[in-house]
Amino acid sequence: MAFRDLYAFDELTNEAERLVIEELARQLEGPDAPDLGEDPEGVVLDIAAYALNRVPPLYRANLLGRLYADSLKDEHRETIREAVAEAIAKILG
């Protein structure tokens, strides 16, 4: 049996991903939202990937980890906001 099959690695979750997606929604929705062009899904995924590569990961493996990651959310809020804004400017600019 392969090592990967012995453990529940699918339980690992990067909370930074959730936070980046929430911030993307804030910055890309509403009346002042930028035009995402003809392939909005591809553009949004590119923006998310770009931003995620610029923020520290916040991995968790269980509910207690989720609570810990949530406690770090405020600490990383500005970093995430800036990374998403930079990603939008880079991909759409």
Image (spheres, helix red, strand yellow):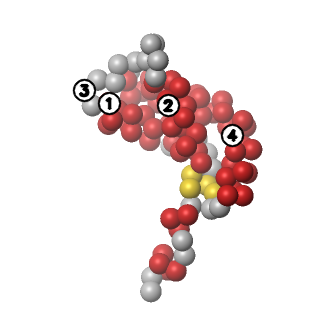
Amino acid on which disc 1 is placed: Pro
Closer-to-camera residue (49/23): 23
Return the disc, 2 or 3, that comes first in the chain's sequence.
2
- Disc 4 marks a residue whose amino acid type is Lys
Task: Provide residue 58's location: percent of width, then percent of height.
Answer: 63, 50
Q: Which residue is mark 3?
A: 38
Q: What element does badge 3 sit on?
A: loop
* Mark sitting on residue 73: 4
Alpha-carbon span between mark 2 and mark 1: 13 Å
Residue at image mark 2: 24
28 to the left or right of 56? left
Find the distance from the CA under tag 3 to the CA under tag 4: 33 Å
Q: Is residue 83 above or below residue 68?
A: above
Q: Quadrant of the C terminus?
A: top left
State how far apart marks 1 and 4 are (Cα): 27 Å
- For residue 40, the mark is 1
Proximity of marks 1 and 3: CB atoms separated by less than 8 Å: yes
Q: Is residue 61 visible?
A: yes
Report whether 13 appears left or right of 71. left
Q: Residue at x 63, y 57 (%)?
A: 60
